[in-house]
Image: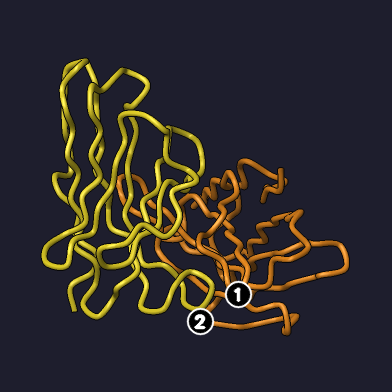
Chain colours: A yellow, B orange
């Protein structure tokens, strides 16, 4: 079974551009989570989605950030008008029944650098 | 707010020794705890989990201990190997929770 797949692995954007991060969950997993990690820090929760629904976006900045998990295709984390403070590693995780029931399985992340 | 934290940011051990990584949590409602290992350039990798109805759980070379009285979690690694060098995170949630909350991590360094 393939694990959680994220692409691209590395993404460089100039200030003001848009960043699109993709995540394909493990087969059979309908629960998707996005986390952000700054260097030397832990992972911070951003958003939790199930197919076509945002369940919890309490960790997502109110502006410029959005996430979706369409019926078909990968989950997308979109950052508009990026700023240098958005530079971080973004990790996607998936689970078959949710974080309170099963451990989350993580991808290897997308490292976003804003120049 | 509620948070999960670790006591030691860096732990150095000799190859072959046992390692103990500690974690304190403050959310008394947490009932599901997970340890992850993160190697450089990779995502967190599941090691072992434990629910609040247990005090101890063992895996292959790893043991997790949960002390609900003092809200303390530990990960024990037996016969530590160079491949165990990584950052270790504890994470917690509630049974009906929507997310895992991660601690800040402990860097484990294995010296030959």
Q: Which of A50 and A95 is in front in this view?
A: A50
Q: Residue at x 40, y 48 (%)?
A: A35
Q: Residue at x 23, y 59 (%)?
A: A69
* Number of marks in the rendered image: 2
Mark 2 vs mark 1: same chain?
A: yes
Dot 1 alpha-carbon crowd within 10 angstroms: few under 14, some 14 to 19, many 20 or more: some
Which type of secondary structure does the marked residue at label 1 adopt?
A: loop
Q: Position of residue B40 (x, y in %)?
A: 35, 45
Q: Position of residue A2 (x, y in %)?
A: 18, 73
Quarter of the image where the N terminus of chain B is located:
top right
Q: Which mark is residue B21?
A: none
Q: Position of residue B29 (x, y in %)?
A: 74, 66
- Disc 2 to disc 1, C-alpha distance: 25 Å
Quarter of the image for residue A95 reads bottom left
Mark 1 belongs to chain:
B
- The mark lying in front, picked from 2 and 1, is 1
Q: Mark 1 points at which residue?
A: B95
Q: Residue B60 carries which label?
A: 2
Q: Which residue is drawn at 68% across and 72% down?
A: B31
Mark 2 belongs to chain:
B
Q: Where is residue A115 in the image (x, y as percent from the top left)?
A: 21, 15
The image shows residue A63, relative to residue A108, as above or below, that is above
Dot 2 alpha-carbon crowd within 10 angstroms: few under 14, some 14 to 19, many 20 or more: few
Which type of secondary structure does the marked residue at label 2 adopt?
A: loop
Q: Which of B94 and B13 is in front in this view?
A: B94
């Amino acid at each position: 079974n393939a694990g959680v797949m994220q692409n691209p692995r590395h993404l460089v954007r100039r200030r003001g551009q848009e960043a699109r991060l993709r995540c394909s969950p493990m087969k059979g997993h309908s629960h998707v989570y996005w986390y952000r990690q700054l260097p030397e820090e832990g992972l911070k929760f951003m958003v939790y989605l199930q197919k076509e629904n945002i369940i919890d976006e309490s960790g997502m900045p109110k502006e410029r950030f959005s996430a979706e998990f369409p019926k078909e295709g990968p989950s997308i984390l979109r950052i508009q008008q990026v700023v240098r403070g958005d530079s971080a590693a973004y990790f996607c995780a998936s689970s078959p029944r949710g974080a309170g029931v099963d451990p989350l399985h993580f991808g290897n992340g997308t490292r976003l650098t804003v120049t | 707010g509620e948070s999960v934290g670790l006591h030691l940011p860096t732990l150095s051990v000799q190859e072959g020794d046992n390692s103990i990584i500690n974690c304190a949590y403050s959310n008394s409602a947490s009932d599901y705890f997970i340890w992850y290992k993160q190697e450089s350039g990779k995502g967190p990798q599941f090691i072992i989990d434990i629910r609040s109805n247990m005090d101890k759980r063992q895996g292959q070379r790893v043991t997790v201990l949960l002390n609900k009285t003092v809200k303390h979690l530990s990960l024990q690694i037996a016969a530590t190997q160079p491949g165990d060098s990584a950052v270790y995170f504890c994470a917690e949630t509630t049974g009906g929770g929507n997310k895992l909350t991660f601690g800040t991590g402990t860097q484990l360094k294995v010296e030959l």
